[in-house]
Amino acid sequence: MKLFIQKVCIALCAFMILSALSFAAMIWIRGKWNEIVLVDISKREQVESISRRKLVFIGGSNLSYGLDSKRVQDSLNIKIYNMGLHAGIGLRYMLHEASSYMRAGDILVISPEYNQFTRFNGSSALADLLIQSKRWKDFPYYKDWGSYPSYFCARVFVPYLLRKGSSGIDQYADNPEGFNAFGDYILHLDQPRREFPRLAMEKRPEPKEIEQIAEHIHALENKKIRIILLPPPYAKTSFQLSKSYIDIIDSELKKNHLPFISSPEHYCMDDTLFWNSAYHLGAKGRHLRTDLVISDLKKIM
């Protein structure tokens, strides 16, 4: 028993030392590591500066890579901004953010990746964003702080030291400099398609999770913000592997009075239209998806 207690104490001490070192490293390089998720800081500033009635898209990178917001704006005659960025931020936190910049009369279009409807509260990318932007009050939105120190050391701090003096950034994928004035990512549009693996949903959707997301959405509706749910574009082979789970999401959203305005199948698109993942459309796919979005929104606006 005594030996067990000693081992537990040693493990706790090691964890506390690692956490302390990680925290010190975070403070040291805060503002110096340039991850794509940190673009949320400038995006939020831009959307908050819009004074007139607006339509805002929220979701993950399916939106940033796969939407031509200027075409949507020209077609619908309303100010458009694309807050889509990174699925790792988590839909709950995206909705929390939206409550600060959406006003009565605004329209919020939600097009999240399907894994947002599983038991998912954001990845370590969310933790990076909260630390970098000093959003201390929002720390409870990230639920996995216990594993963050090891993630930070392996995925942020060590790469930062190795890359010091060079960018270490893919010039065309997830480059923080790759966004236009509407919030769309554009650097990949003239690049050849890259091979990518099929992306099947690994976790079963959680009805309770969907209920809690619905509560956040209904709270926004109570502020007289119009909510519209759109399915994300999804590569056909990945969609087929995930079809049973997508059907559950579709059904649960309807139960919570938040149906997609178009069927998920409507946004199931050929694999050749995607650039480097089952959610990231290339130029042609982006154009076709934008056509679908404009058509669907015009039906209800």
Image: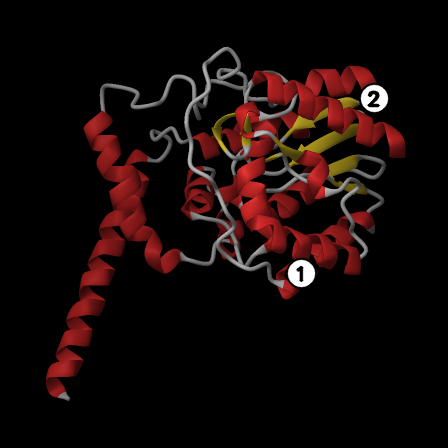
Q: Give the colouring mode of the picture.
A: secondary structure
On the image, which quarter does residue 112 sit in? top right
Q: Position of residue 146 (x, y in %)?
A: 35, 60
Q: CA distance from mark 2 to mark 1?
A: 31 Å
247 vs 258, nearest the viewer: 247
On the image, which quarter does residue 266 sit in? top right
66 vs 125, nearest the viewer: 66
Q: Secondary structure at mark 2?
A: helix
| In this picture, residue 79 sits left or right of residue 181 | right
Amino acid under label 2? Leu
Which residue is situated farthest in the bottom direction here?
1
Q: Is residue 119 above or below residue 175?
A: below
Residue 51 visible at all = no
Q: Position of residue 69 (x, y in %)?
A: 69, 21
What residue is shown with label 1?
A: 212
Amino acid under label 1? Gln
| In this picture, residue 77 sits left or right of residue 5 | right
Q: Is residue 99 above or below residue 67?
A: below
